[in-house]
Image (cartoon, rainbow, N blue to C red):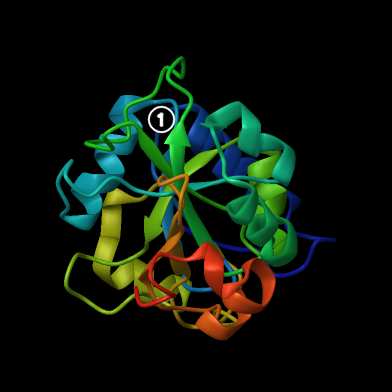
Amino acid sequence: MILPCTDPLTWGPSLDAAVDAVGRGAVVVLPTDTVYGVGADAFNANAVAAVLAAKGRGRQMPPPVLIPDLRTVDGLARDVPASARALMEALWPGALTVIVHAQPSLAWDLGDTHGTVALRMPDHEAALALLRRTGPLAVTSANRTGEPAATTASAAQEQLGEAVAVYLDGGDSPLGTASTIVDATDPAALRIVRDGGVSRERLIEIAGAEAFAEGPTG
């Protein structure tokens, strides 16, 4: 079902429905600042598997994890380089995903992550309101693999259908393009692995060209 989620004064029942769905291990679609995301409780392996199945994706492409605030990083990640933390502090909430080493003690199964996790704090009021109530969500773009990323709730529903319990409709995605992804798992240098909503120039401005492997060549 598609539920309205544009006005903080009235979106309470919609968020309640989404929180309830996440709590029972179901899959939800939520608006973000980049494109719509499809996600579930990051600590529920069956729910994460359902997200991947809805998207038509295998374990070899694990979903990123959306978080509500910077304080969550240290609970989920270890050995975060200072340069990566500088990017997080400057650009979150925003269209930047950072791949870091996951805390080995975490009881989750996001797929074949090889001990890493991709983290992002979205710059979207409804998404953050949901995340504050649910905790970290495993979220990937709300589309079938190979199809265009959805920038509206109805476009997401057209692709994902009944695989999703609740669609939160926050209107058109503000940015309409995916996040930039930076790999911070090498302590010696960052690496840009996908161009997106944050420009390379902005990354250099914050972290310095010397922070990137052979310059920010991706």
Residue 79: x and y, percent?
Answer: 54, 34
Residue name at image x 61 percent, y 60 percent = 122
* Residue closest to the eye, 198 or 13: 198
Asked where in the image residue 198 lies, by quadrant, the reply is bottom right
* Residue closest to the eye, 172 or 105: 105
* Residue closest to the eye, 178 or 133: 178
Q: Answer yes or no: is residue 47 visible.
A: yes
Residue name at image x 47 percent, y 44 percent = 187
What amino acid does circle 1 point to?
Answer: Gly
Residue 65: x and y, percent?
Answer: 47, 45
Q: Is residue 42 above or below residue 144?
A: above
Left or right: where does residue 102 sit relative to residue 91? left
Q: Answer yes or no: is residue 167 visible.
A: no
The quadrant in which the N terminus is found is bottom left
Q: Is residue 69 above or below residue 90?
A: above
Q: Is residue 74 above or below residue 194?
A: above
Left or right: where does residue 101 sit relative to residue 51? right
Residue matched to label 1 = 25
Asked where in the image residue 189 lies, by quadrant, the reply is bottom left
Residue name at image x 22 percent, y 65 percent = 144
* Residue closest to the eye, 47 or 114: 114
